[in-house]
Image (spheres, rainbow, N blue to C red):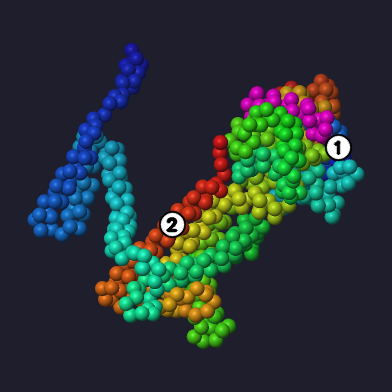
Amino acid sequence: MSTLEEVSTRVHVSLVQPRLPRQAPAITGVIAVALGALMLVLGMGVVGAIVLAVVVYIVALPLWSLAIEGRRSATDRLMTALIWSAFGVAVVPLVSLVWRVVSKGAGRIDGTFLSYSFFKTQIDQPVGIYHAIIGTLLITLGATIISVPVGVMAAVYLVEYGKGNKLAKAITFLVDVMTGIPSIVAGLFAFALFTLIFGPAYVSGIGGSVALSLLMIPIVVRATEEMLMLVPDELREAAYALGTPKWKTIVRIVLPTALGGILTGITLAISRVIGETAPLLLIAGATDRTNMNLFDGAMTTLPVLIYGQNLRGDAPAEAIAWGAAFILIVIVMVLNLAARIVGKIFAPKKG
Amino acid sequence: MAKSIDVSDVNIYYGDFLAVQGVNMTVRAGAVTAFIGPSGCGKSTFLRSLNRMHEVIPGARVEGKIVVDGQDLYEPGVDPVAVRRQVGMVFQRPNPFPTMSIYDNVLAGLKLNAGKLKKNAADEVVEKSLRGANLWNEVKDRLNKPGMGLSGGQQQRLCIARAIAVEPQILLMDEPCSALDPISTSAIEDLIHELKNDYTIVIVTHNMQQAARVSDDTGFFNLKATGEPGHLVEFNPTKKMFANPDDPATEAYISGRFG
């Protein structure tokens, strides 16, 4: 019977496909690395050898796969190799940067480096970056104190009160524009503002804080907005149904639920501005002394100090610059860790 | 404590769209009233207008009179927040506050509205409300655990405890069992029977057997036609509604010959 034959031919589809051996990627990798090493020995540059090895791997493995496994698997192996290479390209500069800063900077760190300023009262007194650490912490703290209330409240307005109206749309647009303003423009704004109020040649830490807060506010608004929109409307309705006024619902229910994400956003914003140099050069100036007063006189921050030491260019100055860069990275890392821990503590709990 | 609700000529809008038209009914005090009807016929919308939750949605408004205890809820000058303290609500999906413990969830209404409470007074309210919601025995040993850790049925009973902790006069329930399994559903139906001694209860349900089991009065909502507003077809004691309804449309819906 013809129908029976048709059925039998249709039913028998082999599910077994020829596969490369499990070690195929490793074998190809070893061959590619060996080829790269060979070229290195023959006098090729390091970068060239690595690129060659990667290209050999990306070409060879899919071709081998195409010959044995067929097209679908070959595409799969090609894309896997490409994605891993892209990952490598992204990570290598990061790792090399951290490695360089740590290896060059960590050696300069000691007690005197962290506890003395540049200002010498005796000829043999050691120098340190205490004044710049204080400057960085104070100016960033000032910027945070200005921008967190403004940013969070603006986001609360956008999500809870202004949903979809024209003012809210205009604010959202302006916030997006503000995200993109160059930091030097923020510095010029603060410079112009303080010059208008206090006359020419005015420098102070708070001016730097104002300039940095201009850069922070849009990031805080954006992050807070996203987090508030993630809070389900059901929670708001549950609170309203208990007879809770809207403002109390926002303060006691919505903000605590979104707190973890908001804190992460604030930390990201701080990390973004803590390394700013240009606006602070304009308005906060630079000094060798430790200045604890945000509202009076010049203040040095770590990035400005690094810039200054780099300009001098002699060996001790360069060592100080690397040390200061290391400390700056440590500060940012500690901030991030702290935000994660605090975010964990306040995150909605299950079970 | 329980109060009746007199509804006359109520029209409910979403912007320009008329969702529910011309509702007249009297919800008896201390009884359970169920609303049934097909999806989209406006029964949830109507329920939400009974404690002014409808207007939380931008552009939504209500015309007509809803009188509780001699006061029209929609008179100018009436504070919706004050209305909601008298008319509590339980939602379709359990929604305990995720940042709060079981204990704080029950007290949420009191703490958010009245401020500080004495410790032993608070303990008393928590125990009374959780006992009222048939949840006390299951959670009394873990009152400080997060409310989100409970099962769906327990969470819903926690929400009921939270709603009755503020001692409202009326309790609205918007399909409180539709996200729950049969055992949790039965626990909540038992609870409704007990609660009707103290509260006027209005419940929306898709489950006609449930309406027949728990309610004293039933209202049947339907759409006049596709695209037309929903309206109240019939409002009668549940026994009459399920045995001998006045309107042929009600009979068709209840007996499953709807179309």
Mark 2: secondary structure: helix
Q: Which residue occupies the foreground of this view, B147 or B63?
A: B147
Q: Residue at x 13, y 55 (%)?
A: A40
Q: Which residue is mark 1?
A: B1
Q: Residues within 10 Å of mark 1 (few under 14, many from 20)?
A: few
Q: Is residue B197 magenta?
A: yes
What percent of the width, then of the height, locates residue B196?
81, 30
What span is in magenta?
Answer: B179-201
Q: Residue furthest right?
A: B70
Q: Residue at x 15, y 51 (%)?
A: A36
**Alpha carbon distance from label 1 to label 2:** 57 Å
What percent of the width, then of the height, locates residue B36?
75, 31
What percent of the width, then of the height, locates residue B120?
74, 40
Q: Which residue is mark 2?
A: A334
Q: Tell me the chief SS of the magenta region.
A: helix
Q: Quadrant of the C terminus of chain A?
A: top right
